[in-house]
Amino acid sequence: MRCIQIMKACAAICIALNFATGAIAQTTTYPSRAVRVVIPYPPGGGNDIIGRIVADDLAKRIGQQVIVDNRAGGSTAIGAENVARSAPDGHTLLITSHTTYALLPNLRPKLAYDPLRDFEPVSLLATQSFALAVHPSLPVTTVRQIIALAKSRPGQLTFSSAGAGTGTHFSGEQFKVLANLDILHVPYKGGNTAVTSVLSGETTMTFGSLSALAPFVSTGKLRIIAVTSSKRSLLDPKIPTIAESGLKGYEMTPWYGLTAPRGTPGPIVERLNAAVVAATQSNETRERMVKVGYEPSGSTPQQLAEHIRHELARYAKLIKVIGFTEQ
């Protein structure tokens, strides 16, 4: 009996050694070919901009070509599903975001992927600050004044967004919920038209990216009141956050991350993580991100996993409170 136990123990050790040897071999030979980074948006958007900046830096650090593959459609679901079904060998990666991993899973019960089950987190890449902006004719300069004005005119104030279900939409809904306001949401087809609606007086206020709003602020056509993120933006640290301006607990921070298919070997994930974190800390990449309105934010795989869980729960709560359903 003791001989059998010893044989089983030896077999287990051999299996473990073989697995470890295989993992080391994969790491030393990885990447053996070009790495494909899937961006679930068409060229030109925030996800695409971040993805291309990271791809450029990643290629230098892993010594292999990194190909950007725009797989738009299904509100990012098509690209995410493509990566989830790819071989878990580190040669296919996904540039993900709050939309892909936190919003859609709460809106589509039959989504073809699960953000926690089907992917290996690699690292956070960047965050973004939206800003609350109003037309200069509106007699407000602070968050408290907007809240007071909205309470004095229930149902009369409006906020525009880039469309129902977008980050700018939920920024406004979170504002309404926490401040207990009656403000009408007016969705548009894109951020540019949402901003134009405030410039023309069609809507009272809007939530948009700082980089998109900046040209109108510099010419006096818009007034930025506060940013939606938990911390002040690197783009303009003088602008206060909504939370510090009187609406405690408010935060709406769009984020972007890098993930791989579930089952990607740990050593490969670790190598990718080291490369990405180094990229987000390099002066060149940081400057490129900040210049276009994004703030570098490298993390450990575990921190990204926890962040995804937190965002899933947060969006689930907000969606339930406002009764939002995908049209």
Image: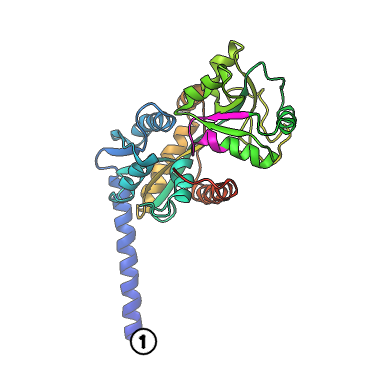
Are there few (<14), some (14-19), or many (20+) residues within 10 Å of tag 1?
Answer: few
Q: Which residue is mark 1?
A: 2
- Hey, what amino acid is under mark 1? Arg
Residue 322 picture quarter: top right
| Image position, residue 218 (x, y; %) | 59, 12
Residue 160: say if magenta.
yes
Q: Nearer the viewer, residue 217 or 297?
A: 217
| Image position, residue 31 (x, y; %) | 29, 42
| Image position, residue 294 (x, y; %) | 51, 29
Which quadrant is the C terminus positioned in? top left
Number of marks in the image?
Answer: 1
Residue sitting at the far bottom: 1
Residue at 30%, 49% in the rendered image: 89
For residue 301, side relative to residue 180 (left or right): left
Which quadrant is the N terminus positioned in? bottom left
Residue sitting at the far left: 33
263 in relation to 201, above or below:
below
Q: Secondary structure at mark 1?
A: helix
Residue at 57%, 34% in the rendered image: 185
Residue sitting at the far top: 219
Q: Nearer the viewer, residue 56 or 37?
A: 37
| Magenta residue span | 158-170
Residue at 59%, 39% in the rendered image: 173
57 in relation to 104, above or below:
above
79 in relation to 110, above or below:
above
